[in-house]
Image (cartoon, rainbow, N blue to C red):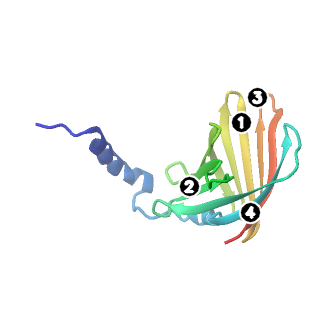
């Protein structure tokens, strides 16, 4: 009798787990609508204020709905060859009742955050658990349908700001 090879066994487990990821009925949760505002191609101008202030940098960020419309995938900071400097993924976790965001940077940095959506203020707020004594907060506030501002702040365990970035994104398409 043959055993399942590791890959097919993994696929069986993934299919069985899908009901937990997607929820009871498999429908996309309505909370994804707020994330859909991020979809598109954006021109970003940002400035790092800490550790030392520098001039503004400009970059492009592309975001799209993927995996059945349950995730918003992003890539940005493209080099001359079109390779992104970072990638990320947003979703709403129906089981945990929270938004989630994963960020991966080409230099090896990565981060996982959970967040909330404030409909009245049109603002996402994501926070990350302290890792190596550093906790982070990301705020994304929509000014209108084509513009949002963001802030990224990382603090050490004593509350000292280690990194602070602010920026503005304008939708191109």
Determine which of the numbered discs, if any, sits on residue 43 in the image: 4
Dot 4: element: strand
Q: Is residue 61 visible?
A: yes
Q: Earlier in the sequence, mark 1 or mark 3?
A: 1
- Residue at the image point whose x is 76% and y is 59% from the top: 44
Q: Earlier in the sequence, mark 1 or mark 2?
A: 2
Q: CA distance from mark 4 to mark 3?
A: 34 Å
Q: CA distance from mark 2 to mark 4?
A: 22 Å
Q: What residue would you read off at disc 3? A: 157
The answer to whether the residue labelled 1 contacts the one labelled 3, judged by CB atoms less than 8 Å apart, is: yes
Q: Is residue 79 positioned above or below 64 on the image?
A: above
The C terminus - image quarter: bottom right
Query: Disc 4 vs disc 3: which is toward the camera?
Result: 4
- Residue at the image point whose x is 85% and y is 40% from the top: 50
Dot 3: element: loop
Q: CA distance from mark 2 to mark 3?
A: 28 Å
Q: Is residue 167 positioned above or below 129 on the image?
A: below
Query: Disc 4 vs disc 1: which is toward the camera?
Result: 4
Q: Earlier in the sequence, mark 4 or mark 3?
A: 4
Q: What residue would you read off at disc 1? A: 135
Q: Earlier in the sequence, mark 4 or mark 1?
A: 4
């Amino acid at each position: 009798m043959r055993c399942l090879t590791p890959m097919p066994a993994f696929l069986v487990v993934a299919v069985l787990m899908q009901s937990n990821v997607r929820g009871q009925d498999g429908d996309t949760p309505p909370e994804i609508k707020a994330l859909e505002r991020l979809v598109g191609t954006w021109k970003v101008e940002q400035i790092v204020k800490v550790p030392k202030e520098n001039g503004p940098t400009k970059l492009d960020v592309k975001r799209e709905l993927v995996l059945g419309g349950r995730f918003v995938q992003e890539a940005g900071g493209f080099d001359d060859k079109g390779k992104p400097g970072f990638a990320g993924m947003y979703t709403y976790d129906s089981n945990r009742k929270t938004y989630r965001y994963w960020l991966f940077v080409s230099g090896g940095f990565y981060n996982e955050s959970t967040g909330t959506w404030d409909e009245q203020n049109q603002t996402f707020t994501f926070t990350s658990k302290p890792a190596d004594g550093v906790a982070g907060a990301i705020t994304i506030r929509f000014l209108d349908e084509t513009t949002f501002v963001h802030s990224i702040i990382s603090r050490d365990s004593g509350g000292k700001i280690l990194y602070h970035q602010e920026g503005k994104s304008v939708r191109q398409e």
